[in-house]
Image (cartoon, rainbow, N blue to C red):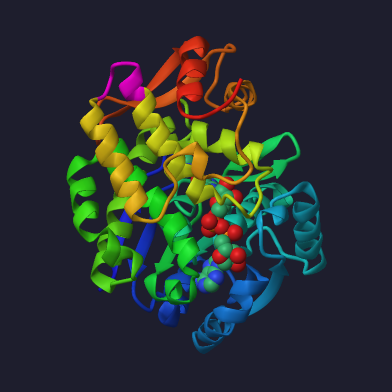
Amino acid sequence: MTIVIPVRAASHPYDVAIGDGLIDDCATWIMPWLKRPQVTVVMDQTVADMQGPRLLQNLANGGISSRLIIVPPGEASKSFAGLSDLSDQLLALQLERSDVLIAFGGGVVGDLAGFAAAIYKRGIDFIQMPTTLLAQVDSSVGGKTAIDTPRGKNLIGAFHQPRLVLADLTVLNTLPDREMVCGYAEVIKYGLLGDRAFFDWLEANGAKVLSRDPDALAYAVRRCVEMKAAIVEVDERDSAGRALLNLGHTFGHAVEAETDFGEGLKHGEAVGLGCALAFRFSQRLGYCSGQDAERSARAIAAAGLPTRLSEIDGGPFAADALIRHMAQDKKASGGALTFVLTRAIGEAFVAHGVDPGRLRAFLLEEGAVQ
Ligand code: NAD
Ligand code: GLY
């Protein structure tokens, strides 16, 4: 069964289709967006090896010719150098303004190709075909596109909504287990930030999602996309409520930065740790019960995600270094620390002007050092 969730973004509305085997029928979905029956597809080498032939064959079967651009796998492709290479290849292929780019991959390819689409000839249409759980539940929806710089992640980018998102759950069959767990961190984040009933469901069914049970996976992806669509519809350009999607990210990004964004700690793992820390910090500040903080950490740990700083290689971490990264977070304004905190499971809120002294004391309690 295919589920279609509309995203009524202010810039333009579009659909997110979720289902098993959508790739096999992708030409039917994509053709209406084309002025000529030709697309350019960006994917990384791993996805090209594992899923590329299936996509290209199905496009051809549906009468769409494709040109392929392969980028190296990994976060390093989301850089000025990666963007320059990709833009140069688009120019060499002489893409016209009315042509359509397809991002077939995880969040790295989606963010990079989406940003290239936003700026190529001042903007062309693109379609997201997410191939990781993280990309299906989060990065392919909502139009945030970006690259990293040595000064931080996602600092150069644009809002550029896709015309269509096609999330085929069967492509997750080749995704390594560790990447499934990383995507699951974003799944559990949705329950923690705004839907206690979904969190309850994940407590009972999380293992099924991780083992790629088709029904459990379909429900989890659907619920996350519904929640993200609702948030993006109200605050497309991230000036208010969209910040809730960053639950766990302020702590998580700081630890990622201290571990040089290396393979030892992947983004999803940092988000899992960050959510556990955000709940315990909320408890410490008197917003949230210890019971909910413990329950959220138990569910995060049950998925195989870290919940304590001591579990992360590269520590112990200096509290002041972590706070410096947190002060550079995109949510910070006027020099004040901003966090997504919680009153309970499913009741996150944005807290401005968090006291650095209380944050420092909390980090020291959590095992950070002076
Ligand atoms: P990723 O794109 O690097 O993919 C992870 C790994 O899985 C890669 O090695 C890739 O080659 C491999 N892979 C992808 N699909 C596969 C498949 N079907 N089978 C086998 N291997 C496959 O990482 P990710 O976790 O998908 O995305 C992380 C990125 O997303 C980060 O850069 C993060 O900043 C960004 N992000 C963006 C948003 C947004 O709103 N734009 C939201 C969250 C995260
Ligand atoms: N992943 C955060 C956002 O889309 O706003």
28 lies left or right of 217: right
Q: How many numbered tags mark residues here?
A: 0
**Residue at horizontal 66%, vertical 50%?**
262
The quarter of the picture where the N terminus appears is: bottom left
In this rendered view, identify the residue nearer to me: 152 or 242.
Answer: 152
Picture layout, residue 29 above or below residue 295 = below
Picture layout, residue 39 above or below residue 255 = below
In this rendered view, identify the residue nearer to me: 252 or 160.
Answer: 252
Q: Is residue 110 magenta?
A: no
295 lies left or right of 356: left
183 lies left or right of 209: right
**Residue at horizontal 41%, vertical 49%?**
186
Residue 148 place in picture, x, y as percent: 69, 43
Residue 215 place in picture, x, y as percent: 24, 70
104 lies left or right of 196: right
Residue 291 visible at all: yes
Range covered by the magenta-colored residues: 282-288
**Residue at horizontal 27%, vertical 66%?**
208
Q: Is residue 287 magenta?
A: yes
**Residue at horizontal 53%, vertical 81%?**
59
Choose top left, top right, bottom left or bottom right for residue 341: top left
